Amino acid sequence: MATFSIGLTKDFDESQIAVKDITTYPQTVNTVSMTQEKISRIMLYSTDAFVADFNSNFANPGSAVLDAEWIFPTDNDTVYSVSMYTGIDWDAVTVDCDSWAIAFYDGDFWINKSVNTKDTGTDPTPRDDNDWARLYVGAAIDFTALGGSNYAAITEAQMRDILETSRSTSSVTEADDGLAQTEGDPFTIAKTDCHEWTITSNLAVDIPMTIELLDVDYSSVDDSLTFSGSEALIDLDDYDSGGDGAYLVKIVYTVSAIENTIYLPIYEFCDAEDCYMQLFQYILCHCSDPCDDCDDDYATRKYDLDMIGHALFQIKQYVYLDKYQYMGIMNINDTRQDLIDTISLMIDKLSIIVDRCGLCDDDDDNEI
């Protein structure tokens, strides 16, 4: 079974969203190994989860050497749902195409509107075969032979229905949904103190919503969180597993009878920053002459200072990468999950040094 995936990136000036095919190729379709150039793609997007708003893009980007990516303009304060539907490239692969199958040929998309299975290796091309119809918004296509409808002029909404039928009926077509939020995100997150975070809802106060704090493996840390007015407060010190680390805030809310789920990452390393400043001040004030031997514990503090400094630099680089690549995007795909897991592991390793904070003796401290 083929599995296709997309990733969404919001442009820095909030004016557009880029959608990219991030599938790991090859994929097996109809027992055939499919690399990227053998796949054709139709992208749809909507501002209301495909209830009343439908938009299509038949550009079919991508090749053997060029990534498949669409870019479309966006409005502010809007959530966009995105779907990618995959067919085949007629000229790039030899494969059987069953009813409802979609193929890209000679710059156009075609759909098999007959009960006959088509063989790309032996059958005529879609332009020369009456069993195929050119697929586009406004096309007149009769699917009654397949138990479908007879369309006089396919609308954007009807195109979604046709693609969904193809996805569920034809083995050569799969779909994957993504979600991106433009400027004016429904929720914002801010650090207010060490280990303290505030989640602010920008939605109407009467919108049903739940909030839960998760570990990065999606296990629950606290499922009793609530919004007081427009704010929910999180104090990581309230939990045995709290403190420095990586966490996810899961929010489920319902707008216009549509349930939405988003995740907001928390990256906390203030204990490490506090330890770093303790060690820096100790070393700066305790032994100003680098030629002096100072004391035996000085080297331990200096080692921990260096390790914490290097680790914090790398962690912050990863955090900035996550914020830049997924700015405003509320879903978490496999690629982003790997990045979150890496940051979490680095903070956990850093905490081992921070717990010691340069001290070899439990009775000692970093005060001068």
Image (cartoon, rainbow, N blue to C red):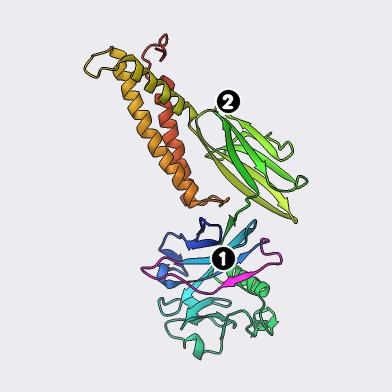
Q: Name the residue type under label 2.
A: Asp
Choose between 190 and 179: the one closer to the eye: 190
Q: Is residue 1 visible?
A: no
Q: Name the residue type under label 1.
A: Pro
Helix, strand or loop at disc 1? strand
Q: Is 298 colored magenta in this rendering?
A: no
Q: Which residue is mark 1?
A: 73
Q: Residue at x 61, y 60 (%)?
A: 81
Choose between 243 and 292: the one closer to the eye: 292
The tag earlier along the polypeptide, 2 or 1, is: 1
Q: What count of labels does the image hold?
A: 2
Residue 365 image position (x, y, % from top left): 42, 13
Helix, strand or loop: magenta stretch: loop
Q: Residues within 10 Å of mark 2 (few under 14, many from 20)?
A: few
Magenta residues (range)? 48-68
Q: Is residue 79 visible?
A: yes
Q: Which residue is mark 2?
A: 237
Residue 212 image position (x, y, % from top left): 64, 38
Decide: is 362 above or below 10: above
Q: Which mark is residue 364?
A: none
Residue 288 image position (x, y, % from top left): 29, 17
Helix, strand or loop at disc 2? helix
Q: Residue at x 67, y 36 (%)?
A: 232
Decide: is 82 above or below 205: below
Decide: is 219 above or below 27: above
